[in-house]
Image (cartoon, helix red, strand yellow):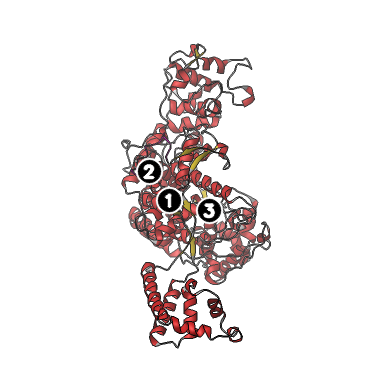
Amino acid sequence: MNKTVFLMIAIAATAMSASFANDVSSEIQVVFDRDVRPILSEKCFTCHGFDEAAREADLRLDTFTGATEEHDGVAAIVPGDPDASELISRIMSNDVDEVMPPPASREQLTSTEKEVLRRWIGQGAAYTTHWAFIPPKRPPLPEVTGTTHPIDRFIQARLSEEGLQSSAVAQPQTLIRRVSLDLVGLPPTLEEIDSFLQASEQDAEAAYQELVERLLASPHYGERWGRWWLDQARYADSNGYSIDGPRQIWKYRDWVVDALNADMPFDTFTIEQLAGDLLSNPTQSQKIATGFHRNTQINQEGGIDKEQYRVESIFDRVATTGTVWLGLSIGCAQCHDHKFDPITQKEFYQLFAFLNNQDEPSMKVYSDGIDVPALQAELAEVESQLSTIIDEQLDEIANWEQGIDEANKESLPKAVQEAIAVEQAKRSFAQKLALYQAAVELGGRYRELHDKRDELLATLDTDVTTFVMQERETPRTTTVLVKGDFTRPAEEVSPGTPSVLHPFETDAEQPNRLDLARWLVSPDNPLTARVIVNRVWQHYFGRGLVQTENDFGMQGTLPTHPELLDWLSVEFMERNWSLKELHRLIVSAHTYQQSSSDRAELRQNDPENLLLGRQQRLRLEAEIVRDVALKASGLLASRLGGPPVFPPIPDGVMSQGQVNREWNVSEGEDRYRRGMYTFVYRATPPPSLNVFDAPDGYSTCTRRIRSNTPLQALTLMNDAGFFEFASALEQIIKQDGLEAAFRRCTSRRPTEDELATLEQLDTLTAARALFNLDETITRE
């Protein structure tokens, strides 16, 4: 572990700040999880950890028993006696053949790290369970003055320990823009800004609470936070690999938006996505939800081994499940025992077994309000009555057939010719209908039933489909695959979960995805609530309370505010896993509402803002950069849901993949839909989204990077879509003036100097410049 990370952990987790590196007195108590485990995990566990196959000298340092066990009369660790401990002898040695870690590993310990290990052994070498594997308990709220908000009490307590204070509340115009972008992904209108500023003068707290409630009730909330979840679901509109053909799965995307708008409890949200089809009498909506694990890639190349890529898709599903819900790199145990976390290769394939028993059909999707089972039952009854009528005329039909000569047969409709060519007992219902209509004078009852059948078929006919999961009647056999090779099956395994976590309990003879989903959201699970709370927090502050948001294991960072994380996790579960309640709780805190302006004392004592003495400026996500420009220009089409759209992209983009594709640019309001509705080919994503770091859907994305490149400025200036938005903003400048256009982009009034600078430009250039402002694409 490098010194920067070590110091960051020390700052974040304890009052023992950077001075710890210089103060090595034996009086300071070493804490295993905070001080020792990071060193051992980074420098030692690769060769002396959980993975038996990779273990050197039969020595384990990840357990007390393994570390203190004698080998040839010596033990790596002798509790209370560092001088008798072989570990200390080795890390202190100057002999290149004896020193550990070996020089070739380039993982040598620093003098501080060596002293930490020496002191820890001298204090008894106590091992403790990794913090993330212990279920969270609600800690008491810190005693602080000046606030009653639970989040603020934890944050201010840590700031006070370092002699720091939180920042003042941000300006009202900053607050309304911040919380609007965070909750619905759109900037406020000028009317909303003016109304909020006026209300804030009367009662700032009440005005802010009313604003938050309005935003949480907005249907655009589901779009903004739906995109957050779709990143993790690795959603895209194509199949991936080199062919990368289009797929139809947008109904799953709409399900996510609708579920979040309805504030579906997160435990239900989880269960329906992983196993909605296995619920009692599942609805169409619950089946659509299972598209979560149909977002895997599909290889359409010729000559492939389909079983290989079926197995590859399940590898992805296991790893994604582990990352999204558990915050663990479970995929690292695909080929061998995990090198750092206590997860065996066998346990990986026990999880694999849950996801190895599905067929992967495409399901027709019907409009809301259509009772498909009832219509199908009615159709069956109509066809039964038609069959009775036809059966009564079989002799007449047979006589008619016999009277047809070859010359006349060629003049008959093709459907009738095909029916005649089939033996009577093997004819389909449609073929019987064709013959009846050709051979028999049609009566009123027949016509009535036939018309009713056509009506029912038209109602049930839909070209909207979506990928879903469907359990097989006969389970597949699951085995450990040697080195992850699907051609090398070994030990047979049954569905199960990692033993390091809470017990897996079920009465089912053959546990399935529904059992797995319920295990994931069990109140006894030490990880799921923490992981989700941390990812939501990360969205508001740029980093999570645990910075390694996808790794809560041994290699992950410690939480900066562990008590706050546990308090929020318990609160989340006890508030019925409500995401809206979690959002409300966070955005109502002073910690969230602070100014993002830097201060000298914070810059000196907490340069990375780990203690949250101020807010964080964050570049907007790719889709929201587009949405802000659409809203500011007055072009935004705010309709929710529906098939993906095709806004303008540069010529030649679709020729970059292995297969050339058409990109038929959408017209009308579809041209101006929100960014989340843009069709995304995995192999050739839209450049205006890609340049702003939108994920491509190849794998789960739990945190987007935020790059800063010249291409972004060029996109905002010259991309066909943004040029069109600027042209619309130019008309606003001409009609309402530069100040109104500036406010549409930034939610604040320009200074005199800013206005004077813009007035030197022609109106179109001024509009393009406004979209290129850092402030326009940044959440303050």
Q: Please indicate, yes or no, whether residue 275 appears anywhere in the rendered image.
A: yes
Q: Please indicate, yes or no, whether residue 144 appears anywhere in the rendered image.
A: no
Helix, strand or loop under label 2: helix
- The dot on residue 274 is 1
Helix, strand or loop under label 1: helix
Q: Considering only vertical position in the picture, is 81 above or below 365?
A: above
* Image location (x, y in percent) of residue 646: 58, 65
**Which of the two discs, 2 and 1, labels the residue nearer the N terminus?**
1
* Image location (x, y in percent) of residue 356: 48, 47
User: What is the three-letter code of the residue carrying label 2?
Assistant: Trp
Dot in front, 2 or 3: 2
- The dot on residue 621 is 3
User: What is the three-letter code of the residue carrying label 1?
Assistant: Leu
In whole angstroms, how far apart are the C-alphas of marks 2 and 1? 11 Å
Magenta stretch encompasses residue 317: no
Which quarter of the rendered picture does the N terminus lie within?
Answer: top right
Residue toward you, 211 or 32: 32
Q: Is residue 222 left or right of residue 604?
A: left
- The dot on residue 519 is 2
Residue toward you, 599 or 276: 276
Residues in magenta, as a range: 496-508
User: What is the three-letter code of the residue carrying label 3?
Assistant: Glu
The 10 Å Cα crowd at callout 1, few under 14, some 14 to 19, many 20 or more, is many
